[in-house]
Amino acid sequence: MMGYGVSYGYGMGAWWLIWWVIWAAVLVVPFWRILPRYGIPAWVAIFAAIPIGAVILLWVVAFSEPKAEHPQRHK
């Protein structure tokens, strides 16, 4: 009973960090592509890695007017 829980979690730090980096990439990459369409610099997408940053960016994009789109290219 004395040692129970002491060793739990030693290896969890590395897995947590890997999981966070993957999740951050899943959020940042789409924002990186979408934000320039609304006149916002792409580097601002880094804030999407922080949960409140992602929510704020969603609100900004939701209530912003997109810049003029490029004309459709015909294939």
Image (cartoon, grey):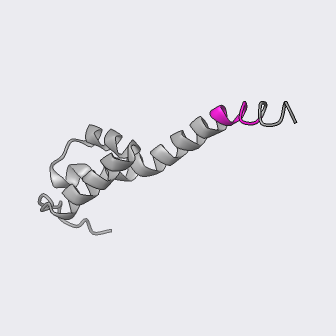
Instruction: State the image coordinates of residue 66 (x, y, percent, origin top left).
Output: 15, 61
Q: Residue at x 12, y 57 (%)?
A: 67
Q: Which residues are magenta?
A: 8-14
Can residue 21 be seen in the rendering of this structure? yes
Q: In the drawing, does residue 69 fall left or right of residue 16? A: left
Instruction: State the image coordinates of residue 14 (x, y, percent, origin top left).
Output: 65, 32
Residue 62 inside the magenta-drawn segment = no
Q: In the drawing, does residue 30 fall left or right of residue 26? A: left
Instruction: State the image coordinates of residue 52 (x, y, percent, origin top left).
Output: 33, 48
Instruction: State the image coordinates of residue 26 (x, y, percent, origin top left).
Output: 47, 50
Q: Residue at x 77, y 36 (%)?
A: 5
Q: Is residue 59 above or below residue 2?
A: below
The foreground one among 9 and 27 is 9
Can residue 34 be seen in the rendering of this structure? no
Q: Is residue 14 above or below residue 24?
A: above
Q: Residue at x 53, y 42 (%)?
A: 20
The foreground one among 62 and 39 is 62
Residue 7 occupies quadrant = top right
Q: In the drawing, does residue 29 fall left or right of residue 63? A: right
Check the picture and name the quadrant holding the C terminus.
bottom left
